[in-house]
Image (cartoon, rainbow, N blue to C red):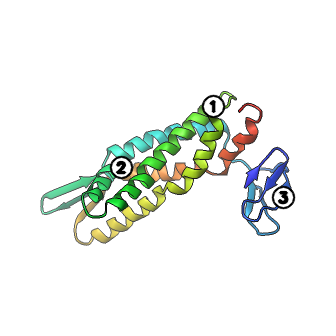
Amino acid sequence: MTISRNWIICEHCDSLYESVPLGKGQAAQCSRCGALLARARYMNVQQLFALSITAGLLFVFANLFPVIKISLEGLSNEATLWQSVEALAQGRISLIAAITGLTIILAPCLQIILLCWVLGFANFDRAAPGFKACMRALEHLRPWSMLEVCLLGILVAIVKLAGMLDVHPGLGLWALAMLTVLIILISGKDIRYLWDDLEGRY
């Protein structure tokens, strides 16, 4: 979906519609293909900025603290997200390790940094330096940030290992779960309204 001040273009079938104000809870759909065109804003810039800062802190916790702890007969081990990537890199699947590092560490990190950057300036009704490049980068990063896939994989591993070992979720896993929800909320369609909010200032 592309939004301008007066028009909305469907990103699926390129149909053109006149933009109209939406009330709380309302959404606009394409009459041709049924795709979601726009949704009433759930959060303002201040709320998005606060959540971005929180996401940054959770990202640090998710990478510093273990996501899973395993113990058997007095022996225990634990791993952080970064240690998991390092373990993959030591085997014959270094390409998978690189992709994993990109999707669960690098892409989310860049996403959070860019969100804090553009929203920090937007909080003062200003466009951040490099605003256009940052907004385009956020669009390109969104498909590469796969924290939800990582979280699902960890939960599946915990369930499968629980019958053989003592498995305990670590603080990093709780941080990752909350971070996943925040990233989905922040990087949704609400962030695209910055193009309109800051029109003429970038």
Which residue, given by chain and number where applicable, does mark 2 sit on? 172
Q: Residues within 10 Å of mark 2 (few under 14, many from 20)?
A: many
Mark 3 residue element: strand
Q: Nearer the viewer, mark 2 or mark 1?
A: 1
Mark closer to the chain start, 2 or 1:
1
* Mark 3 Cα shell of 10 Å, populated few (<14), some (14-19), many (≥20): few
Image quarter of residue 59: top left
Q: Name the residue located 33 percent from the left edge and 65 percent from the top edge.
A: 158
Q: Position of residue 104 (x, y in %)?
A: 42, 53
Give the left or right position of residue 27, taking residue 79 as reference: right
Left or right relative to 97: residue 187: right
Disc sitting over residue 16 in the figure: 3
Marks counted in the figure total 3
Considering the numbered disc 1 on the image, is that residue within a helix, a strand or a loop?
loop
Cα distance between the residues tagged 2 and 1: 32 Å
- Circle on res. 151: none
Task: State the SS at label 2.
Answer: helix
